Image (cartoon, coloured by chain):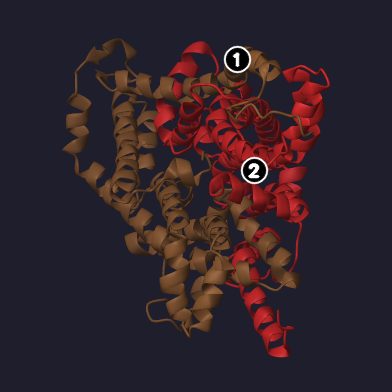
């Protein structure tokens, strides 16, 4: 084993025997690299880049599947219609509201869960992790139905259990009002996705050196001081990545809203608007324009996060 | 470490119960609903007054059988195939990224990242139109292909993270012994890499199993409609009856595989999720 030369170490004095095959191998490695990675790369492009380019093209036409022969080029007309429509801005507002509130709540709740898992006694650690993975693995639609039936005025028990809370009585129909509907939608989303954020935070927490916190404790720092001055600053990268990923995920929210209200009572989100326009109403041109705008929103969020908050996605996700 | 005192034990017991309640209560809620008879649904109580399996009978052997069982078959088949293809492609790709030196490595990882944050609904409209033209609408391949946009990127990231931790000296040793790069990969590395590949497969399967957007947009009949989409289209025994019980029973049945996988592979799933996501 002592004679093995690592190909990555640019062996200064590796000797003649190693130098010659090295360059040949580098060439072979390059070919093999693309041979192995190429298919995955091509498939990824084929299933995303191609459709979004197609959507960009379709969005320039007035094109309905119900009247395909009337298809005509209208330039940016569809975008003009959407961006001057109240519905787009209302849906954008609802989507952003859901994104901001769920991410904030999930960050706090997820951090608490991460702390619990981090400090848990060995005897309960496995149990806690197993339990927490159930919401992560469960189908979003199933989660939506579970929350929907619990709150529903007919089949639910929440009104019955919480009738002592001001504003809740047996006749409260949660899904007939904007705020009450959004409350249940967000609760279901938070329940389902907090485990993911807490696992990301747990990994960040594990990377904070124990010596640092112990030293701070010896120096007489309170729990709060240790948290805010030692632990949190040291896991900033993990927190940023978790927030960005969850924010982008929350921004695409669809399943919960579709199941619970289908966008009624002002709870429509952007994904649902895109779905209704193209799949339900078969307005491919207009639907494509909504899709492209949604895509641009996601790019904007990414851009803001990376430029303004300096989130190092690639580094944090392990390409170092 | 101090020995855990009684007080500490009690504290942890309380915390554990709270976490368990948080994680399992909604599941318990729909489980309870699935055992309620239609007449029992509006009592406003958590538990059924009389436990009944009528909902399970309806979806497994009764009227809703065709709808549910076909969607279950579709879900299992489509999710497994999409997982398999993604894991095979990702294994080759992640091996190249973790092990070989070639230009474009970083671009591939960035692409995977970009694809994983892509808004699914943005791809649905063009696919819907294209699939109708070329005959893939409402077929298995019509879902398997777009599912790769969900399963492939995370598989590449997770596997690349796993593969970086493998002791590659073994491969070099094999090569010194005269094996080609490919042989070294197959004989020395595959057995070591198998656990990571398996974990990745579970995570990819969860994601494919969870899909709803593609499922409702790209299918129209029982030929390819997966369970989440079928749940949204369930109807009651008569048009005046809510399908609450049937949906709850179906929801429980499709949750069983998830719970089993989580129970069996908790440790692997946690390490897969955290490694692929944060650590290098």
Are labels 1 and 2 on one chain?
no
The residue wearing badge 1 is: A23
* Quarter where residue A252 is shown: top left
Residue B92 in the image, given as x and y percentages of width and height: 65, 25
Residue B256 or A179: which is nearer the viewer?
B256
Residue A208 in the image, given as x and y percentages of width and height: 53, 63
Asked which secondary structure carries label 2, the reply is helix
Disc 1 vs disc 2: which is toward the camera? 1
* Quarter where residue B159 is shown: top right
Side (left or right) of A163 relative to A166:
right
Side (left or right) of B186 relative to A291:
right
Chain letter, disc 1 residue: A
Relative height, residue A92 to residue A187 (above, below): above
Residue B206 in the image, given as x and y percentages of width and height: 64, 43
Shade of chain B as shown in the rendered figure: red
Q: Which residue is located at x 83 percent, y 21 percent?
A: B177
Relative height, residue A89 to residue B87 (above, below): below
Asked which secondary structure carries label 1, the reply is helix
Q: Which residue is located at x 36 percent, y 20 percent?
A: A53
Residue A263 or A9: which is nearer the viewer?
A9
The quarter in which the C terminus of chain B is drawn is: top right
Side (left or right) of B206 relative to B190:
left
* Quarter where residue B164 is shown: top right
Residue B88 or A295: which is nearer the viewer?
B88
Whether residue B98 is visible to the viewer of this picture, yes or no, is yes
Shade of chain A as shown in the rendered figure: brown
The residue wearing badge 2 is: B203
- Mark 1 is surrounded, within 10 Å at the Cα level, by few (under 14), some (14 to 19) or many (20 or more) other residues, namely few
Alpha carbon distance from label 1 to label 2: 39 Å
Whether residue A170 is visible to the viewer of this picture, yes or no, is no
Residue B193 in the image, given as x and y percentages of width and height: 74, 36
């Amino acid at each position: 084993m002592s004679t093995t030369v690592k190909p990555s170490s640019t062996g200064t004095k590796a000797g003649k025997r190693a130098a010659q095959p090295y360059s040949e191998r580098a060439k072979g490695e390059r070919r093999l690299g693309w041979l192995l990675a190429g298919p995955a790369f091509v498939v990824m492009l084929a299933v995303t880049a191609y459709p979004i380019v197609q959507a960009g093209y379709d969005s320039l036409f007035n094109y309905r599947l119900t009247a395909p022969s009337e298809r005509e080029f209208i330039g940016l007309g569809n975008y003009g219609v959407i961006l001057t429509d109240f519905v787009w801005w209302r849906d954008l507002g609802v989507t952003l509201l859901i994104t901001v509130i769920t991410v904030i709540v999930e960050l706090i709740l997820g951090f608490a869960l991460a702390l619990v898992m981090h400090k848990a006694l060995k005897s309960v650690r496995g149990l806690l992790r197993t339990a927490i993975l159930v919401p992560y693995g469960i189908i979003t639609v199933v989660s939506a139905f579970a929350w929907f039936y619990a709150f529903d005025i007919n089949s639910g028990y929440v009104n019955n259990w919480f009738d002592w809370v001001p504003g809740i009585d047996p006749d409260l129909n949660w899904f007939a009002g904007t705020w009450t509907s959004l409350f249940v939608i967000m609760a279901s989303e938070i329940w389902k996705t907090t485990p993911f954020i807490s696992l990301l935070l747990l990994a960040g927490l594990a990377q904070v050196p124990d010596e640092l916190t112990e030293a701070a404790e010896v120096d007489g720092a309170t729990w709060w001081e240790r948290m805010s001055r030692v632990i949190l600053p040291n896991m900033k990268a993990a927190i940023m990545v978790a927030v960005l990923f969850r924010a982008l995920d929350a921004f695409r929210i669809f399943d919960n809203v579709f199941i619970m209200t289908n966008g009624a009572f002002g709870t429509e989100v952007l994904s649902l608007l895109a779905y209704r326009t193209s799949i339900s109403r078969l307005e491919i041109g207009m639907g494509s324009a909504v899709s492209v705008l949604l895509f641009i929103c996601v790019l904007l969020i990414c851009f803001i996060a990376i430029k303004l908050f300096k989130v190092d996605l690639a580094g944090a996700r392990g390409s170092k | 470490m101090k020995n855990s005192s009684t007080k500490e034990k009690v504290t942890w017991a309380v915390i554990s119960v709270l976490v368990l309640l948080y994680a399992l209560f909604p599941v318990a809620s729909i489980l309870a609903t699935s055992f309620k008879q239609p007449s029992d649904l509006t009592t406003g109580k958590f538990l059924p007054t009389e436990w009944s399996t009528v909902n399970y009978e309806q979806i497994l052997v009764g009227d809703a059988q065709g709808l549910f069982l076909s969607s279950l078959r579709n879900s299992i088949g489509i999710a497994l195939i999409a997982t398999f293809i993604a894991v095979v492609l990702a294994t080759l790709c992640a091996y190249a990224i973790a092990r070989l030196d070639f230009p474009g490595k970083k671009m591939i990882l960035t692409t995977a990242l970009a694809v994983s944050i892509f808004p699914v609904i943005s791809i649905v409209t063009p696919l819907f139109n294209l699939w109708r033209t070329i005959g893939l609408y409402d077929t298995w391949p019509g879902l398997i292909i777009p599912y790769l946009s969900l399963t492939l990127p995370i598989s590449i990231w997770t596997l690349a993270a796993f593969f970086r931790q493998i002791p590659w000296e073994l491969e070099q040793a094999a090569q010194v012994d005269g094996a080609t790069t490919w042989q070294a990969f197959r004989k020395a590395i595959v057995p070591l890499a198998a656990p990571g590949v398996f974990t990745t497969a579970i995570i990819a399967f969860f994601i494919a199993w969870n899909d709803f957007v593609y499922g409702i947009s790209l299918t129209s009949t029982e030929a390819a409609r997966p369970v989440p989409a079928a749940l949204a289209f369930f109807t009651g025994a008569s048009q005046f009856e809510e399908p609450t019980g049937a949906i709850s029973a179906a929801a429980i049945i499709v949750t069983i595989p998830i719970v089993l996988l989580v129970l069996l592979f908790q440790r692997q799933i946690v390490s897969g999720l955290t490694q692929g996501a944060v650590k290098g």
